[in-house]
Amino acid sequence: MSEQEQPSFNIEKIYVKDLSLEVPNAPGVFLDQEGPSISVELNNTAAQIDEGLYHVVLTATVTAKRDEKTYFLVEAGQAGIFQIRNVPEDNLEPILGITCPTILFPYVREVISDAINRAGFPPVMLAPVNFEALYHQRQEQAAQAAPAQVQ
């Protein structure tokens, strides 16, 4: 293979695309003695933006609630522009769904923790995520949903 045909992967840019923080029940939530329960949602999107350039956004939403009272809601979209060239088509989707989110995760984790801390709450450290397992789980769900749509 010539150098032109060698597969390549480069990070072109990593940035915060979106950041939202809400503390709807302040200042009352700071007086509560009991702590809230924390829920975390992750979502990943990817799109080709140019020849060999892909834009991937990992969105993390962290919500703290007790009963129906929301303590805080933070949503951060950590984005990256990745140059991916000469990769077979069947390998491209796993790179966009596993490798890129794995690279973006430490950044979004820091943004989330910092935003929560600046809102006056103890920082929340998101646990490590196995994006490969999530990717395969989504693939299975999509495969199961496809036959249901045909009927």
Image (spheres, helix red, strand yellow):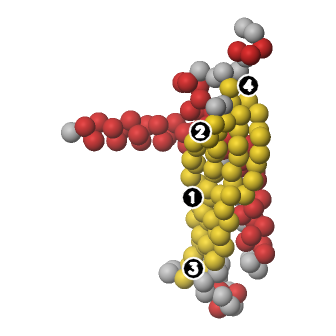
The answer to whether 140 appears left or right of 62 in the picture is left
The answer to whether 96 appears left or right of 103 in the picture is left
Mark 2–mark 4 Cα distance, whole angstroms, equals 16 Å
Badge 4 vs badge 3, beta-carbon distance below 8 Å: no
Q: Amino acid at mark 4?
A: Ser
Give x and y (percent) for residue 20.
Answer: 65, 70
Q: Estimate how packed mark 4 is, as few (under 14), some (14 to 19) or many (20 or more) residues with alpha carbons within 10 Å.
A: few
Q: Estimate how packed mark 3 is, as few (under 14), some (14 to 19) or many (20 or more) residues with alpha carbons within 10 Å.
A: some
Mark 2, secondary structure of its residue = strand
Give x and y (percent) for residue 18.
Answer: 66, 62
Residue found at x 55% / y 39%: 135
**Quadrant of the rendering where the N terminus is positioned:** top right
Mark 3–mark 1 Cα distance, whole angstroms, equals 16 Å
In the orientation shown, which residue stands out farthest toward the left?
Answer: 151
For the question of whether residue 102 can be seen, the reply is no
Q: Say whether disc 2 or disc 1 marks the residue closer to the N-terminus.
A: 1
The tag on residue 70 is 3
Q: Amino acid at mark 3?
A: Thr
Quadrant of the rendered image containing residue 9: top right
The tag on residue 8 is 4
Mark 1–mark 4 Cα distance, whole angstroms, equals 31 Å
The answer to whether 102 appears left or right of 132 in the picture is right
Q: Which residue position holds label 1? A: 41
Q: Is residue 151 depicted above or below 23 in this figure?
A: above
Q: Nearer the viewer, mark 2 or mark 3?
A: 2
Q: Estimate how packed mark 2 is, as few (under 14), some (14 to 19) or many (20 or more) residues with alpha carbons within 10 Å.
A: some
Q: Say whether disc 2 or disc 4 marks the residue closer to the N-terminus.
A: 4
Mark 2–mark 3 Cα distance, whole angstroms, equals 37 Å
Foreground pick, 51 / 19: 51
